[in-house]
Image: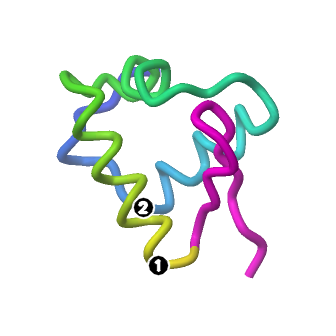
């Protein structure tokens, strides 16, 4: 699934994370799945989602969506 990075909403990003939850999900792999040109763009988006309390990064390659 390739999506233009400027068109990806937080909800769509969370849906992709949920879809692959429990798998080895590196920032680089997530960037590739989303069609981002740079893993740092994904890293910045993940930091914002974590600051909002929407995800929790338990270790480098494990990202979980928090239940609200």
Would residue 20 be found to the left or right of residue 11 on screen? Answer: right
Q: Quadrant of residue 53?
A: bottom right
- Which of these two is toward me, 33 or 46? 46
Give the residues drawn in magenta, as a range.
Answer: 54-68
Q: If you read the primary sequence from the N terminus, does the residue marked by circle 1 or circle 2 appear first? A: 2
| Secondary structure under the numbered disc 2 in the rendered image | helix
The x, y position of residue 63, in whole percent, is 64, 45
The residue depicted at 45 percent of the width and 65 percent of the height is 49
Q: Answer whether labels 1 and 2 touch (C-beta < 8 Å).
A: yes
Rendering coords of residue 55 (x, y %): 60, 62
Label disc, if present, on residue 68 of the rendered structure: none
Give residue 47's quadrant in the image.
bottom left
- Relative placement, left or right, of 34 versus 26 is left
Circle 1 residues within 10 Å: few <14, some 14–19, many ≥20: few
Placement of 12 over or under 17, stated as above or below: below
Q: Where is residue 39 in the image (x, y as percent from the top left)?
A: 29, 28
Left or right of 33: which side holds 35? left
Residue mark closest to the camera, 1 vs 2: 1
Above or below, 49 relative to 22: below
Q: Name the residue under label 2.
A: 10
Q: Name the residue under label 1.
A: 52
Q: Where is 63 relative to 29, above or below?
A: below
**In the image, farthest residue toward the front:** 59
Q: Which residue is drawn at 33% across and 53% down?
A: 45
**SS for dot 1:** loop
Cα separation between marks 1 and 2? 11 Å
Q: Per the image, is 60 magenta? A: yes
Residue under the point 81% across and 34% down = 22
Question: Majority secondary structure of the magenta segment?
Answer: strand
Which residue is located at x 48 percent, y 49 percent?
A: 13
């Amino acid at each position: 699934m390739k999506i233009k990075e400027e068109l990806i909403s937080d909800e769509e990003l969370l849906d992709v994370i949920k879809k692959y939850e429990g798998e080895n999900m590196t920032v680089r792999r997530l960037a590739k799945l989303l069609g981002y040109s740079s893993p740092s763009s994904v890293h910045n988006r993940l930091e914002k989602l974590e600051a909002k309390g929407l995800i929790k990064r338990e270790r480098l390659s494990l990202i979980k969506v928090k239940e609200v």
